[in-house]
Every structure is written in C-alpha cells, then in structure tokens.
Image: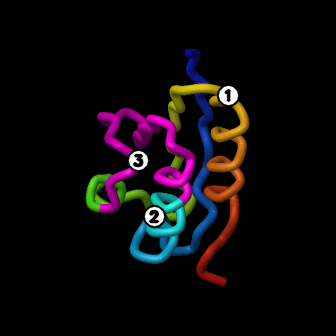
Amino acid sequence: MSDATRTVVVASAVGLHARPAGIFVKEVTASGHKVSISKAGGASVDAASILSVISLGVCHGDEVTLTVSGDDPESVADRLESLLLTDHDS
C-alpha cells in the first residue's frame, strides 16, 4: 500500500462546514480508504468523521492537506481534491 498527498485550497464559500463537509465525508467513507485531513500548521484528523472535519474550522480559501492510504490512493485523492476545489454553496 502507498500513500497519496494533496494540498488544496478550499473553494466552498463557507469552508468545510455542514453541507460541504458532509459531501466530503460521504465521499471519504464511500472510498473505503484511510484518509486524513489537516489545516496548514495543524494536526491531522480522520476525514471520515464529520465532527473531526468540522472541528478543523476550515474557511473559504484555507489550505488543507489530504493524505490517502490504500490501494490506488491517487485516484481517491484526485476525487477528494476535486470536491474541495468546488464551491458547494453556490
């Protein structure tokens, strides 16, 4: 198994709160991969936990780092990166 890492600027107008976080966590869970997310300079949390993701306090324009572990982590990281680069609030 290998890891894939992506650093992404969050596009959603309200950051990773409520709806955008729910969409993101749902995709993480569906992937079946171990995924962690961290805000620049902060501790990483389990990206499959809605409460953990919201607790990061990620706002629009904040940079986050994703780390995906498992089989074919690159494609999962690409999908998650795409979700974070989309404004789910417009």
Residue 23 in the image: above or below residue 44: below
The Cα–Cα distance between marks 3 and 2, rounded to whole angstroms, is 11 Å
Residue named by callout 1:
72
Q: Residue at x 32, y 41 (%)?
A: 45
Name the secondary structure under disc 2: loop
Please name which of the two marks, 1 or 2, marks the residue nearer to the observer.
Answer: 1
Residue tagged by mark 2? 16
Range drawn in magenta: 27-50
Instruction: Give SS at disc 3.
Output: loop
Please report whichever mark, 3 or 2, sits nearer to the chain's N-terminal start.
2
Where residue 49 appears, x then y in whole percent? 32, 54
Give yes or no for residue 28 being in the magenta stretch.
yes
Residue 70 or residue 79, whichever sits in front: 70
Could you tell me which secondary element the residue under label 1 belongs to? Answer: loop
| Residue 24 placement (x, y as % from top left) | 52, 60
Q: Amino acid at mark 1?
A: Asp
Residue 64 position, x and y percent, is 50, 43
- Crowd class of label 2 (few under 14; some 14 to 19; many from 20; radius 10 Å): many
- Tell me what residue is drawn at x 43 percent, y 41 percent: 37
Q: Earlier in the sequence, mark 1 or mark 2?
A: 2
Q: Residue at x 66, y 84 (%)?
A: 90
Q: Residues within 10 Å of mark 3 (few under 14, many from 20)?
A: many
Earlier residue among tags 3 and 1: 3
The residue that mark 3 highlights is 47
